[in-house]
Image (spheres, rainbow, N blue to C red):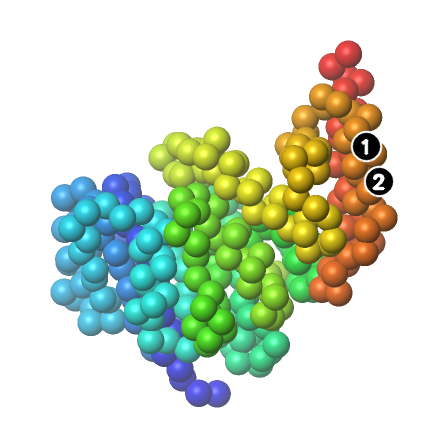
């Protein structure tokens, strides 16, 4: 099997120094060695800067970009993809950890499965000194595509994407998405190939008070809903105010106007699903969410 170059993209802004070191080390210690490591210093703090310069001086696989102004994660990822020279592009967040065989196993999977556009992995979750398992996802691409209709089921920091699919189809993160930019890209990417989540825990997601999902929860939710709702057109439904309102209630567990939301659920059950979705699983998801709304309403009476 050929040993193609793989590009790893990381953006750094005011990260815990211990987390940053562990994250960088987890990439540099990969068993797959032919990588370029694109790291963006997004006007981070001085301690972070020292760490980044130390590693850049020590390992010539690191390409360090030092921003003169804080550009934000989305802008850095867009530029990173534009600059990447690898056959495949990996994401790594500055506070997460990759197992030392992550890149090798993802690379092998993409080399052997040419119809797959992106591969991700199952994960561990670390909060403080406690590490727990994240439930496994079924590997079948239709399951993943159907899950993406309702939620983002993919760890951003675990993905490897075919660079040619991104470049040839002008696919990249959307600059208007300041949060949940990954979810938006995954949904658009499903039009160009399969997305697979490996049933191996090859990455560790770190939970802490300063991570984006904790600090910017409401904004994250806003962008998540924007992507989830936009997919209604994929199954032939109009994006009018009424449909958007009812679908938002179903996704967020809002029990106001429950009768109308139930009618909306029935409408979802009856539409024709796209060929890359599992219709049965889609319906199960709708039914489960509807039942939760009903139970919630009964309990809160």
Residue at x-position 80% and y-position 18%: 298
Q: Quadrant of residue 278?
A: bottom right
**Furthest residue in direction bottom, as rendered:** 1
Point out residue 48 in the picture as x, y percentages from the top left corner. 20, 47
Point out residue 52 in the picture as x, y percentages from the top left corner. 19, 55
Residue at x-position 39% and y-position 52%: 175
Q: Is residue 136 left or right of residue 188?
A: right
Q: Is residue 106 above or below residue 197?
A: below
**Furthest residue in direction top, as rendered:** 301
Q: CA distance from mark 2 to mark 1?
A: 6 Å
Q: Residue 228 versus residue 27: which sits nearer the camera? A: 228
Point out residue 246 in the picture as x, y percentages from the top left corner. 71, 33
Q: Secondary structure at mark 1?
A: helix
Tags 2 and 1 in contact by the CB under 8 Å rule?
yes
Q: Is residue 280 above or below residue 160?
A: above
Numbered marks: total: 2
Q: Is residue 66 above or below residue 110?
A: above
Residue 272 in sight: yes
Q: Is residue 108 left or right of residue 266?
A: left
Q: Is residue 292 left or right of residue 179?
A: right
List the residue tagged with mark 2: 266
Residue 198 in sight: no
List the residue tagged with mark 1: 262
């Amino acid at each position: 099997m050929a040993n193609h170059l793989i590009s790893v993209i990381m953006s750094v802004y005011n990260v815990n120094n211990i987390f940053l070191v562990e994250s960088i080390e987890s990439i540099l210690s990969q068993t797959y060695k032919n990588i370029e490591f694109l790291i963006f210093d997004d006007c981070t703090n001085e301690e972070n800067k020292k760490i980044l310069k130390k590693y850049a001086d020590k390992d010539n696989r690191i390409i360090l970009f030092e921003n003169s102004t804080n550009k934000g994660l989305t802008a850095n990822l867009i530029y990173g993809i534009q600059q990447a020279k690898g056959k495949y592009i990996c994401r790594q967040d500055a506070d997460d950890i990759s197992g030392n065989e992550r890149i090798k196993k993802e690379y092998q999977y993409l080399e052997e499965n040419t119809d797959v556009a992106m591969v991700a992995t199952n994960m561990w979750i670390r909060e403080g000194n406690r590490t727990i398992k994240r439930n496994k996802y079924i590997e079948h691409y239709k399951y993943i595509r159907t899950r993406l209709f309702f939620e983002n089921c993919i760890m951003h920091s675990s993905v490897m994407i075919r660079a040619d699919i991104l470049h040839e189809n002008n696919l990249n993160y959307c600059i208007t998405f300041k949060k949940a930019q990954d979810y938006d890209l995954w949904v658009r990417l499903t039009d160009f190939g399969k997305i697979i989540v490996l049933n191996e825990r090859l990455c560790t997601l770190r939970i802490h008070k300063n991570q984006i999902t904790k600090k910017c929860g409401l904004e994250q939710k806003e962008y998540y809903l924007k992507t989830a709702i936009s997919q209604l057109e994929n199954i032939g439904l109009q994006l009018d105010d009424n449909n958007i309102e009812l679908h938002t209630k179903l996704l967020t567990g809002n029990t106001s106007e429950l009768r109308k939301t139930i009618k909306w659920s029935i409408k979802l059950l009856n539409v024709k699903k796209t060929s890359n979705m599992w219709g049965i699983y889609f319906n199960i998801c709708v039914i489960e969410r509807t039942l939760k709304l009903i139970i919630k309403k009964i309990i809160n009476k």
